[in-house]
């Protein structure tokens, strides 16, 4: 692998990767500890409700996870799940059969709801009409599990003896996603890039969830848009500045039958000084090797 000096910096693209509760997946809001001491069915038109708060200015709720199981002698086949805003207005709703989500044993059921963008506090309420037990986490609690009723929407006084509100957590979770991190500014601090004087690119980032993880910089040809170089920097928090140093190089793989370029490479951590010239950079690639008289062609990675 060899490099070639480039001229002026032509184009810069940025890719940001935020960290979530599940890697590259949805954000899950939860108050319970994951263990149900028992289950409780409400009935009588009453609902189990949990108060959450959106983790960023605009958070999109897309599903609700409920820990529950079917009751042996159900008086109703359906349940209703509603999302209420901070004024107790229903902003998303789904109604379905309980046996489509719950079984005879306790387990987590993921219920998709119409996407809704939420700012600030919101309530998730489920009305199981005595068709299902909802998992109950008993112990020190947040006091954010409530009893609710509909038409009109309201929060009722807690009267579930021997359960106490400060010791009861309904096992209901909110699942959603946050807006992408914001690129505040991108500055190229050098007119040209070279091995002796690498170009410095500075990027300021902001994230409403305060969970920035990494920023990846791509350098591309201005006319062809072909990416010729990339680098990655670890970042964290709500605001961060990432600095990249581009030595104006283009990597290529050469062989008897020609060369392939550009090849994007990655720095390898923990390489000793003796092996840095050989192993400092790596590039995942697929090579076509001809073994000639030894028979056949093979693919090698």
Image (spheres, helix red, strand yellow):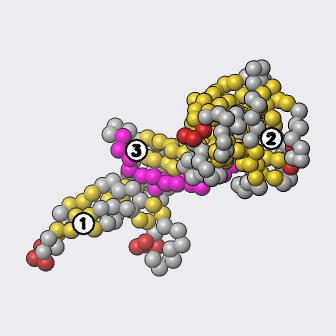
Point out the stretch of residues depicted in magenta.
225-247
How far apart are the alpha carbons under marks 1 and 2? 58 Å
Residue 147 relative to residue 125: left or right: right
Precedes in sequence: disc 1 or disc 2: 2
Where is mark 3, residue-wise? 220
Q: Where residue 252 sits in the image (x, y, percent)?
A: 32, 59
Q: Position of residue 188 (x, y in %)?
A: 53, 43
Residue 108 x %, y %? 62, 49
Q: Is residue 290 magenta?
A: no
The residue at the far front in this view is 73
Q: CA distance from mark 3 to mark 1?
A: 29 Å
Residue at 10 percent of width and 76 percent of height = 293
Q: Which residue is mark 2?
A: 145
Closest to the observer: 254 or 146?
146
Measured in 3D between alpha carbons, the distance from the residue under mark 2 to the one under mark 3, in whole angstroms, is 52 Å
Could you tell which of marks 3 and 1 lies nearer the N-terminus? 3
Q: Is residue 296 left or right of residue 287?
A: left
Nearer-the-camera pick, 110 or 2: 110
């Amino acid at each position: 692998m060899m490099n070639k000096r480039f001229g002026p910096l032509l184009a810069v693209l940025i890719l940001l990767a935020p960290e979530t509760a599940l890697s590259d997946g949805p954000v899950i809001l939860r108050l319970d500890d994951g263990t149900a001491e028992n289950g409780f069915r409400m009935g009588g038109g009453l609902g189990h409700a949990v108060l959450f708060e959106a983790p960023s200015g605009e958070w999109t709720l897309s599903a609700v996870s409920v820990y529950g199981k079917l009751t042996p002698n159900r008086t109703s086949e359906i349940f209703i799940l509603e999302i209420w805003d901070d004024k107790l207005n229903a902003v998303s709703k789904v109604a379905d059969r309980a046996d489509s989500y719950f079984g005879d044993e306790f387990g987590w059921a993921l219920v998709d709801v119409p996407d809704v963008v939420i700012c600030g506090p919101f309530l998730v309420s489920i009305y199981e009409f005595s068709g299902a037990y909802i998992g109950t986490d008993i112990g020190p609690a947040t006091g954010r599990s409530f009893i609710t009723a509909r038409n009109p929407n309201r929060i009722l006084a807690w009267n579930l003896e021997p359960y106490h509100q400060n010791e009861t957590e309904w096992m209901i979770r909110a699942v959603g996603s946050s807006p992408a991190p914001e690129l505040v500014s991108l500055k190229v601090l050098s007119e040209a890039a070279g091995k002796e004087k690498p170009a410095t690119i500075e990027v300021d980032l902001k994230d409403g969830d305060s969970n920035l993880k990494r920023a990846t910089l791509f350098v591309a040809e201005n006319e062809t848009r072909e990416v010729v170089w990339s680098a990655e920097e670890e970042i964290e928090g709500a605001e961060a500045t990432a600095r990249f140093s581009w030595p104006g190089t283009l990597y290529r793989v050469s062989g008897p039958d020609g060369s392939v370029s550009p090849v994007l490479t990655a720095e390898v951590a923990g390489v000793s000084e003796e092996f840095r010239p050989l192993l400092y950079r790596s590039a995942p690639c697929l090579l076509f090797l001809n073994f000639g008289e030894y028979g056949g062609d093979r693919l090698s990675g």
